[in-house]
Amino acid sequence: MATLYALRDGVADSRANRSPYFWSLFTEPDQRRQRLHEGWKAVARVMALGVFMELVYQLIVFRWVYPLQLVVVVLGLALLPYVILRGPLKRIASWWTTRRIHARPGRSSHAGRTP
């Protein structure tokens, strides 16, 4: 789910011509708060689901809740993939859209194929 949110937001970053997410957290201090809020909002639901699933898992397997393990697992499986993947997915989306824009006009998707 974190990857899907990263894909959605990376494409939105590409369309808005914004800097890659993780990079902009360090290089654009005036935008940092807004970008952090935006990222948190995107993964909050995934993190809540992750907490629920990890709690159920721990109760079934260990019959006890280990809070530190819960935090590490949820951050590692929800927040970290989002932060790591959003920038590269933005770059891929930018490459994809510029490639499609610079395609030769009048060229069909069946060019070079014989019927």
Image (cartoon, helix red, strand yellow):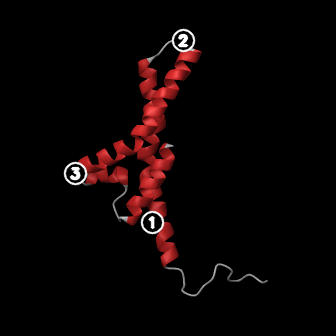
Q: Is residue 88 visible?
A: no
Report the residue marked by disc 2. Answer: 63
What residue lies at 31% left-to-right and 53% top-to-bottom?
Answer: 24
What residue lies at 50% left-to-right and 12% top-to-bottom?
Answer: 64
Which amino acid, mark 3? Answer: Pro
Which amino acid, mark 2? Answer: Arg
What residue lies at 40% left-to-right and 59% top-to-bottom?
Answer: 12
Q: State which mark lies toward you, 3 or 2.
A: 2
Which circle's residue, 1 or 3, is located before the other in the chain? 3
Instruction: Measuring from the top left, give residue 61's x and y in whole percent.
Output: 58, 16
The label number, if any, that marks residue 94 in the structure image: 1
Residue furthest out toward the bottom: 106
Q: Residues within 10 Å of mark 3 (few under 14, many from 20)?
A: few
Q: Residues within 10 Å of mark 2 (few under 14, many from 20)?
A: few
Instruction: Measuring from the top left, give residue 106's x and y in whole percent.
Output: 58, 87
On-image quarter of the C terminus: bottom right
Of the pair 104 and 40, the residue shown nearer to us = 40
The label number, if any, that marks residue 29 in the structure image: 3
Of the pair 26 and 33, the residue shown nearer to us = 33
Q: Are marks 3 and 2 in contact (CB under 8 Å)?
A: no
Of the pair 2 and 90, the residue shown nearer to us = 2
Instruction: Measuring from the top left, give residue 65's x and y in whole percent.
Output: 47, 15
What residue lies at 71% left-to-right and 83% top-to-bottom?
Answer: 112
Q: Callout 1: helix, strand or loop?
A: helix
Q: Is residue 69 visible?
A: yes
